Amino acid sequence: MVARLLLALAFTSIFGASMTVESLAVFADSESNAANVMSTGSVSISDAPDTAFLVVANMAPGDTSVTSLVVTNNGSLPLRYALTSSSTNDDAKGLAAQLQLNIRTLGTSCVAQDGAVLYSGGLSAAAFGSVVQGAQAGDRDLAAGANETLCFRVEFPLASGDTFQSATTTTTFTLSAEQTTNNP
């Protein structure tokens, strides 16, 4: 009887072990989304004309000259800009400090000089706004794709003396722009 019981237990163990089948299969799925694209904007400032625009020859005391410069935001982001200048006087006569410059926004016309004053003073110190990052006093804002006209009026004061005869100065104006988005 013990032999039969042992035989029955052995049979149950073997049969039970052979009947235990484990399945590791599970349902699964995946989905691919189309290629997602991220891109950055751009800050791009230009001026027209992009060559020398304030060229005045043979000035006499009391003369003035008016011209314009169109500043354009060619980028995709709104920007703010500032203007700085650098003047040289190769003849050491100091004409850059003697000439008076007035920079305004366009009003009815540049000749009328009725736009907002951005700078008024000696040519050698011409500037408005600040190249320091963030919004600064005098900075100019331009939306993407927008432009504005700046009017430049240079005057050779009537009281200028003989020391300025045959004097020459060269000035370079630089427009520096930065994004306004996320840049208070």
Image (cartoon, rainbow, N blue to C red):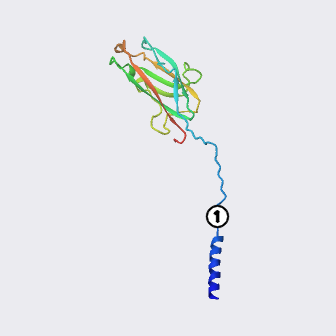
Q: Residue at position x 57%, y 27% from top?
A: 147
Q: Observer-nearest residue: 114 or 136? A: 136
Q: Observer-nearest residue: 75 or 119? A: 75
The x, y position of residue 125, in whole percent, is 41, 27
Q: Observer-nearest residue: 9 or 35? A: 9
Figure label count: 1
Quadrant containing the N terminus is bottom right
- Measured along the vertical axis of the image, is residue 110 above or below residue 135? above
Residue lying at the far left in this picture: please name it. Answer: 92
The x, y position of residue 63, in whole percent, is 46, 14
The x, y position of residue 66, in whole percent, is 51, 18
Q: In this view, does 165 lie to the left or right of 18?
A: left
Residue lying at the far bottom in this picture: please name it. Answer: 1
Q: In this view, does 16 lie to the left or right of 135?
A: right
Q: Observer-nearest residue: 51 or 165? A: 51
- Measured along the vertical axis of the image, is residue 25 above or below residue 6? above
SS label for mark 1:
loop
Residue identifier under label 1? 23
Q: Residue at position x 43%, y 12% from top?
A: 57
Q: Is residue 49 left or right of residue 172?
A: right
Three-letter amino acid code at disc 1?
Answer: Ser
- Within 10 Å of disc 1 (Cα), the crowding (few <14, some 14-19, many 20+) is few
